[in-house]
Image (tube, grey):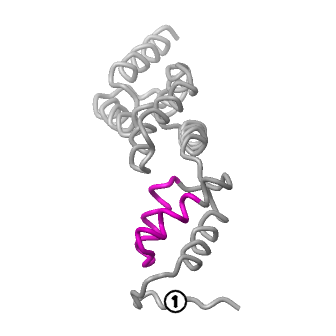
Amino acid sequence: MRKYRNMTEQSELTFEEAKDKALRLLEFRSHSEKELSDKLKRAGAKEFDIEEVLEFCRNYGFVNDRQYALSKARDLKNLKKYGNQRIKAELYSKGIQSEYVEEAIDELGDDEDNMLMPLVEKKLRGDFAKKNIDKCIRYFLYRGYNFSDIKNCIEKIREEYCEE
């Protein structure tokens, strides 16, 4: 039978409790080492125990920042349709090392333009009013695409609409 701690109670976790907490967290989704460390810290685990728990998780393959970066980057690109800049920012915010971030971005390839074109076309819906174009540009800048790529897509789409 598990004993759950009261959230207002800030007592320290033992090593075993910290390990159990980490395994429960990893049961639901993968975490980066930094995410897991932060969550254990907030739960009241000691710094020494956190490092041991992370070492345990690394040894058994439960935590792997390289795999996490690759998987997270693919998900952000394919599911959320984020651009490379936003993907990098998301990975850095999860505490991923820059070498893993760059590897993940390289693996995604350079087909950002091919992915961006239909998204911009859908967003514009044939309305090339300045207000709508500005809104579209802000939308895709927030999602991590380059300004010049967005502008090029808008121009190509505008040319296609003018031909028809």
**Which quarter of the figure has residue 27?**
bottom right
Is residue 79 visible to us here? no
Name the residue rendered at 54%, 60% in the picture. 54
Q: Residue furthest top?
A: 163
Quarter that holds the N terminus: bottom right
Q: Is residue 107 magenta?
A: no
Name above or below for residue 136 compared with residue 13.
above
Magenta segment range?
Answer: 32-55
- Using the image as rendered, state which of residue 155 and residue 112 is in the foreground: 112
Amino acid type, callout 1: Arg
Name above or below for residue 10 compared with residue 125.
below
Helix, strand or loop for the magenta stretch, by majority: helix
Percent across and percent down for residue 3 are 61, 91
Is residue 125 visible to us here? yes
Name above or below for residue 83 compared with residue 3.
above
Mark 1 Cα-neighbour bin, 10 Å: few <14, some 14–19, many ≥20:
few
What residue is disc 1 on? 5
Percent across and percent down for residue 141 are 35, 34
- Using the image as rendered, state which of residue 56 and residue 28 is in the foreground: 56
Name the residue rendered at 48%, 15% in the picture. 161
Classify mark 1: helix, strand or loop: loop
Along the horizontal axis of the image, is 138 left or right of 68? left
Name above or below for residue 14 compared with residue 93.
below
**Which quarter of the figure has residue 55?**
bottom right
Q: Is residue 37 magenta?
A: yes
